[in-house]
Amino acid sequence: MLTRLSRTRRARRARRSGFTVMELIVAIVILSIGLLGLAATSGIVMRLIGGGTHQTVAANVALARFEQLRSLSCGRMVSGSGVNRNVQEAWSVTPIGPVATPRAMDVRLTITYQTSMRRGGSSSRTQSYRSQIACI
């Protein structure tokens, strides 16, 4: 009698151990939803990284232009435009103080660059910078 009861308990435990098909299907569905969400997020992250790269290039072009203008005397600073590293730049120079002997120059720099969009198109972004360069 005792051995028969223990065999029955062991058989019940053996039938209960493991996962049912329904539990496995639910687990696979939840895992699939998580993976799809991760894949969608990775596309957005890659676009943001690309946008950050464009902004860094634009900021470096602006820095180089400001440094070039700082190396000139105030009388030689003039407004202009140009293309550098696939970035369009336009700057305006305005004297601060008397025009004959300005104490500083107000420099406004506009940078325009192309960004790629999700569906293969592109759009342009514009950033503006401003600096005052002292006349010595």
Image (cartoon, helix red, strand yellow):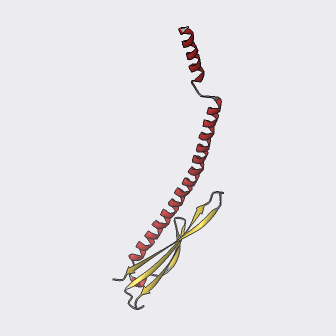
Q: Out of 57 and 72, give the one closest to the viewer.
A: 57
Q: Quadrant of residue 35?
A: top right
The answer to whether residue 97 is left or right of residue 87 is: left
Which residue is found at the position 54% from the left and 57% from the top?
48
The relative height of residue 132 versus residue 54 in the rendered view (above or below) is: below
The relative height of residue 94 versus residue 112 in the rendered view (above or below) is: below
Which residue is found at the position 39% from the left and 88% from the top?
102
Which residue is found at the position 63% from the left and 62% from the top?
122
The relative height of residue 126 versus residue 134 in the rendered view (above or below) is: above
Q: Out of 64 and 43, give the one closest to the viewer.
A: 43
The residue most toward the front is 1
Q: Position of residue 11 (x, y in %)?
A: 58, 16
The relative height of residue 34 versus residue 44 in the rendered view (above or below) is: above
Q: Position of residue 40 (x, y in %)?
A: 60, 50
Badge count: 0
Q: Quadrant of residue 136?
A: bottom left
The answer to whether residue 130 is left or right of residue 86 is: left
Q: Quadrant of residue 24?
A: top right
Q: Out of 122 and 82, give the one closest to the viewer.
A: 122
Q: Position of residue 33 (x, y in %)?
A: 61, 44
- Quarter occupied by the N terminus: top right
The answer to whether residue 10 is left or right of residue 73 is: right
